[in-house]
Amino acid sequence: MTDATRQVVVAIDLPSHRMTLERAYLAPVDVAVDSIDDMQLLTFVAGLAGMLAMLLIFNAAFYRILREPFVLWHSALTLSLLMTIMTSSTLSVVFFDPPAMTLSWMTTLLFGMTVASGAMFTYSFIEPGLMHPALRRLLPYCAASALFLSAFHAAFPFVARPIQSTAYTAAFAPILIIFILSMIDALRRGSRAAKFQAVGYTPMIAVGLIRLVTGVVPWFESIDATLAFYAGCLFEALFTTLGVADRFVTMKRERDRARIEADLLERLSETDPLTGLLNRRAIEGQFAQLRADGFATLAVIDLDHFKSINDVNGHAVGDAVLKAVANAFQTGPDVRAYRLGGEEFVLLLRGNDAATLAERRRQAIPGIVASTVPGLERPVTASMGVADTFGDEGFEKLYERADKLLYEAKSAGRNRTRSTIKAETDLEIFVKEQAFAN
């Protein structure tokens, strides 16, 4: 262009899209920003691109916490929107100034990626059972179709040149219809996730409808709805991310509830329903940790002639006796009590006076039972075997040795203890306490 230039004649040979002619204009220089309005738009687009980049970081953090496929698809959707904004705005000229045909096929491919990732995000994000199975099955086919259409249009832009762009645009109509029906069906079924998607996708769907109608109907001027597209990106980024965060909170609550229920069931499975003491399953599961915490003494206790209590007084009285015996064990920081079954109990103890603690509890049984269950013909006594652990032996081996000592106590006349540990007498304990006090 010089001062002598009077006219510029341009010929466009077989344009591939009507919008090429309708939106084409000549510029004196190839610059990204040539007015204040352009600068304001560029600033807005750059801010939107930065927000989308931050969402990718959030998604990476979300995925580390909860590895759900919808997070990956939301990341793919966000990335494709970010790249679409870069290529469709003047940012691409600012950063790398690609040739026109490069921008053309990049924009085409990114559009297909956006539609495909959006369909797969919906497929994995809507809660199970809150979308018709047929519609859910169609969404992956919609994603594959969008990728195929975009790849074909980008690779062969001049095949069937007069009609290809119109046919390409019209081919997305079934995909858009299936997507809208999926949203409506999910909303009708009460999907919470669909509510966030519906708000976030509404501007994008409106842009798609505008481009579809104006690109297919001959007597309409083609409209790319660029500003509406940017607004749609903003809404999509905001509300689908809120939906992802809401889904995370919901799934966390569900997992926490499931974990609490599992813990409750675990505790119930390890608890004797009659006495409230832990059972054999519990002690076998806890023994290694308790042994590491210093619980090195095992006492096996068996009530003497308990069968006669049931035979004479009935099972209800027998159950009351078992509950009273459980109370006599007085569990605490150094004493754990378990009921193995029937009238057999186990104490797991720690400390230098473990044998004394066990003996005190055995001797307390007759008095506590008598005060709790009146009317028994004779005192309820118990026999006990006490053993210390050797090395790293497990529960079964330790129980076997303590149980053998229990039967020695029964054979010796019952109501007594057989132990490999010398228990201190009450007098010895009293003397020690006085010495410590002085």
Image (cartoon, rainbow, N blue to C red):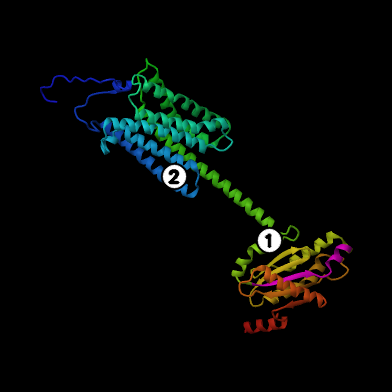
Q: Which residues are magenta?
A: 296-311
In the picture of the structure, the residue carrying the numbered disc 2 is: 59
- SS under mark 1: helix
Against 395, is 6 above or below? above
Q: Inspect the image, locate mark 1, and give the three-letter code of the amino acid beneath it.
A: Arg
Which image quarter holds the C terminus? bottom right
Residue at x-position 42% and y-position 22%: 170
Q: Is residue 304 magenta?
A: yes
Q: Mark 1 against mark 2, which lies toward the viewer?
A: 1
Q: Position of residue 42 (x, y in %)?
A: 30, 35
Task: Please give the count of numbered marks on the rendered protein.
Answer: 2
Question: For this rendering, which residue is in front, 16 or 313?
Answer: 16
Residue at x-position 58% and y-position 49%: 256
Residue at x-position 55% and y-position 43%: 250
In this view, which residue lies farthest toward the left?
4
Question: For this rendering, which residue is in front, 259 or 103?
Answer: 103
Q: Is residue 200 left or right of residue 352?
A: left
Residue 281 has which mark? 1
Q: Is residue 334 magenta?
A: no
| Distance in Å between CA atoms under marks 1 and 2 | 42 Å
Against 124, is 300 above or below? below
Q: Inspect the image, locate mark 2, and give the three-letter code of the amino acid beneath it.
A: Asn
